[in-house]
Amino acid sequence: MQIKTISYIKQNAATLDVEEPIVVTQGGKPVYRIESEASAQIRDEGIALLKLMNLAERDIREGRAIDSEQLISNLGLDIQE
């Protein structure tokens, strides 16, 4: 992860390489993070997946799940094994 000052970002904004995130500091303290859109999408998709997994685990714990045989029966499918 790169660490740059706000002044550096202002002077070099057009040529920044955001393949890895850049932490932007002001007065020696981190205040912003710059990352590529692709990296942000991957992170956001990962967070969404974790949320879905959490909801699924909660449903299982609270008995709001059915097994595959019940699902097939509920859908009215005739599946031969």
Image (spheres, grey):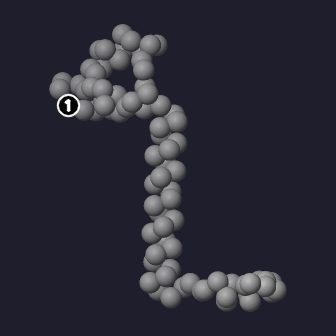
User: Looking at the image, which residue is at 82% across and 86% down?
Assistant: 78
The residue sitting at 30% across, 26% down in the picture is: 2
Amino acid type at circle 1 is Lys
Q: Residues within 10 Å of mark 1 (few under 14, many from 20)?
A: few
At horizontal 46% and vertical 46% (from top left) the residue drawn is 43
Q: Position of residue 47 (x, y in %)?
A: 46, 54
Establish if 46 lies above or below 33.
Answer: below
Image quadrant in which you'd find residue 28: top left
User: Which residue, as the protein is rendered here, is positioned at the far front?
Assistant: 81
Looking at the image, the residue that sits furthest to the left is: 28
| Looking at the image, residue 43 lies above or below residue 27 | below
Quadrant, the C terminus:
bottom right
Q: Viewed as shown, does residue 29 lie left or right of 31?
A: left
For residue 23, above or below residue 74: above
Is 77 in front, or is 63? 77
Q: How many numbered marks does the figure carry? A: 1
Please provide percent x and percent y for residue 45: 52, 50
User: What x and y, as percent, mark residue 17?
Assistant: 42, 20
Residue 35 x %, y %: 42, 32
27 lies left or right of 80 = left
**Which quadrant holds residue 1?**
top left
Q: Which residue is mark 1?
A: 29
Task: Find numbered disc 1 in the image and state the secondary structure of the residue it sits on.
Answer: strand
